[in-house]
Image: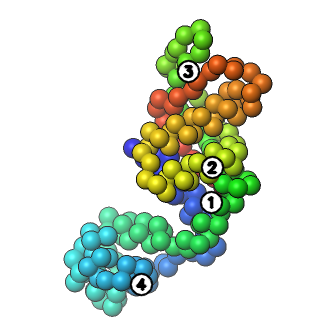
Amino acid sequence: MREIDDALERAGQEAFTREPPKSTQARVNFLLKQLKTTQAVASEIGVTPDSVNRYRRGARKNPPAHIADRIDSAVRARWQPRIRNRQQRQAATSTGITIETRAQFGYTAPIGTTDDGRFRRLTVHLPPEYAGRLFDARQQGATDQQMRDIVAEGIQETYFKDGGRRAQDLEVAINNIEYFDVSF
């Protein structure tokens, strides 16, 4: 599962200043501009190069739902990269990110450890240093567990330890994520 990576992708898409192309023909033409060849577009969306050419010309307008979803996600992943990067830079340097999650947390403390079988719903604003670390880790291809560790450390410091005012020896881990959402 890549809950954190998916949430960062959705948050980046919320930063769009213009909507991506609507028609299948315009979307495929956009992908052709980005990926340069019909073969690359075909492998990206899971169809043959002939199908890509039909979509490009407008001869085929309504792809099956699973192909339409692949086209949509491929377009959204490449749409307005400079806007998305600017929002991420701003979050990493000045504003931070807000995380909303329902997850199961485990704790290690001097008294002992627990898996804490109940889920907690948290909305926590993480400072820019954690946002920067999270974006850097994502860009370097970090695993979901590595990104969970960064988020858990941020939640530990800002929420559970309250910036160093309590629970000094507490260590927090995210054991299970039911949902995860990010905004920046």
Spatial separation of the CA atoms under disc 4 and disc 1: 25 Å
Q: Position of residue 155 (x, y in %)?
A: 63, 35
* Residue at mark 2: 131
The residue singled out by tag 1 in the image is 88
Q: Secondary structure at mark 2?
A: helix
Give the label on residue 107, or none: 3
N-terminal-most mark, 1 or 2 = 1
For residue 52, side relative to residue 5 (left or right): left
Give the colouring mode of the picture.
rainbow
Earlier sequence position, callout 3 versus callout 1: 1
Q: Is residue 176 above or below residue 7?
A: above
Q: Amino acid at mark 2?
A: Ala
The answer to whether residue 28 shows anywhere in this view is: no
Q: Quadrant of the N terminus?
A: top left
> Residue at coordinates 66% horizontally, 54% vertically from top-left?
92
Residue contact between numbered discs 3 and 4, judged by CB atoms under 8 Å:
no
- Label 4 with label 1: CB-CB less than 8 Å: no
Q: Position of residue 119 (x, y in %)?
A: 54, 27
Say whether residue 84 is left or right of residue 50.
right
User: Which residue was labeled with disc 4?
Assistant: 33
* Circle 1/circle 2 CB separation < 8 Å: yes
For residue 36, which numbered disc appears in the image? none
Q: Quadrant of residue 90?
A: bottom right
Amino acid type, callout 1: Gln
Q: Calculate the distance from the C-alpha at mark 3 to the C-alpha at mark 1.
A: 30 Å
Q: Residue 150: in sight, yes or no?
A: yes
- Up-down relation of residue 153 to residue 75 (above or below): above
First reached walking from the N terminus: tag 3 or tag 2: 3
